[in-house]
Amino acid sequence: MSKVVIVDVGTGNLHSVHKALEHVAPAATVIVTSDPDTVASADHVVFPGQGAIGSWVQALDARGLRAALREAVANKPVLGICLGLQVLYDHSEEDGGTPGLGVLAGSVRSFATAEAGPTAGSMHDPLTGQLLKIPHMGWNQVIQMRAHPLWDGIPADSRFYFVHSYYAASDDRDEVAGETEYGIRFTSAAARDNIFAVQFHPEKSQHSGLRLLKNFVAWDGSSP
Amino acid sequence: MSLAKRIIPCLDVDNGRVVKGVRFVDIRDAGDPVEVARRYDEQGADEITFLDITASSDNRETMVHVVEQVAGEVFIPLTVGGGIRQLEDVHRMLHAGADKVAINTAAVANPEFVREAANHFGSQCIVVAIDAKQVDNGPAPRWEIFTHGGRKPTGLDAVAWAKQMTDFGAGELLLTSMDRDGTREGFDLALTRTICDGVTIPVIASGGVGNLDHLVDGIRDGHADAVLAASIFHFGEYTVQEAKQRMAQAGIEVRL
């Protein structure tokens, strides 16, 4: 029976992810852990994250989880959620510049910088003309950029729940599995080999989110 | 293609029971917050907010169990307000499965609490609830913050307070007009628009919704990012689905 391990770096609420995975995979064993050995023993690894990336990476190292995470992304199905997507990139602008794990090519940028930068003037709410609010919070559409087992049964342009102030800008188009528009068009889902990562919260995205989690637990890690 | 405006049903919970007369015809126990939350989820609610109106702090533990149960079967964002006074309260609710907490009185009593909570748990889970009342009816209206159900003035200017709470790290504001709350006359649109245009974070409009057009007004004219209502959904007059259809007809982007 499949063993699904949720990596706990101690910075967020993992209750919802845990419950949602149990809900979609009643036959699987779902464990929340900060023990590297338990992560190593998993069939599927989920790493959710929230809060600030700098303290998240520090907490990861304080718990000795970096090596376990590296090993997981090298050889088993891995799902990153929210900060768990952002940390896979080379670098983040957050917290004065934070190096990521460098698993995916690209960088993580602030919506606030985008608003003030070259795209200034385009970051407005189409209905009210207001500047777009930050954080990007609520249900937005995900454009599926390529076929993937984790999109199985999820209609094109389905809405998922987002809450974030930084977004991923991919350097490798092949790694972009989904895109979302909020003033700019950013990578809301990334995929490479046995890794899938999403900026939104599948555990809070009702039917579509639960389907994605179910697809993940059923996934053998092979990419199309 | 853009971010949907949100519809958020609110449940007032007293000692673990939904109050204010829920009248779903086909629900076994209309006082059970779990059943009511499940129903709103089925109707397409974008989030659900629980307001704990329990007077006694001894009974607050009950709310934790409610949140735990709901979070185990309803997979949309959950916000809990009422009695959030210290970091431990925030921690307990988040750990039980809440995604956000709404801080009201404690923010007025000690604004630094909002900063601490945002630093500790992240802005994404800190909602500051603002109860505002108009104090100047002249050509340039002003609103002030009131506590204790609108009875106690604080002297705080609502716009300045909304900006301060944004600066202190609130991720979202829940704005209630105490003049309109319970009247079913619609949102105070001038207040809503003034606050929504004055801050950089999302604002949920609340207080006064009596029909579906009021929800449309709150988004279109009030510039709110989300609208919250209690009684129009509780009494079974309208479903959340109907509210969304009305908003979609008005050209507002919603999750259908």
Image (tube, coloured by chain):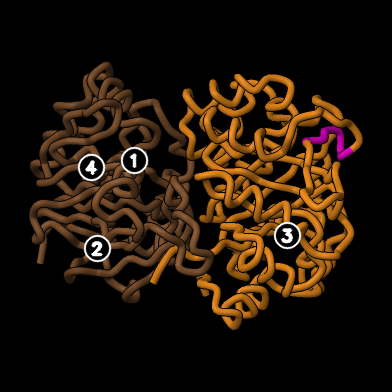
Name the residue at the front extreme.
B139
Q: Chain of mark 2?
A: A
From this view, report whether residue B144 is shown above or below residue A10: below
Q: CA distance from mark 1 to mark 4?
A: 16 Å
Q: Are marks 2 and 1 in contact (CB under 8 Å)?
A: no
Disc on res. B218: none
Visible in this render: residue B46? yes
Judge left or right: residue A163 versus residue A187. Answer: right
Badge 2 is on which residue? Answer: A178
Residue depicted at x 60% and y 50%: B203
- Residue at image mark 4: A108
Chain bearing mark 1: A
Q: Colour of chain A?
A: brown
Q: At numbered mark 4, what does the secondary structure look like: helix, strand or loop?
A: strand
* Residues tagged by mark 1 and mark 3 found on one chain of the structure: no
Image colour for chain B is orange
Between A172 and B138, the one lying in front of the other is B138
Query: What number is the disc on residue A48?
Result: 1
B141 relative position to A170: left or right: right
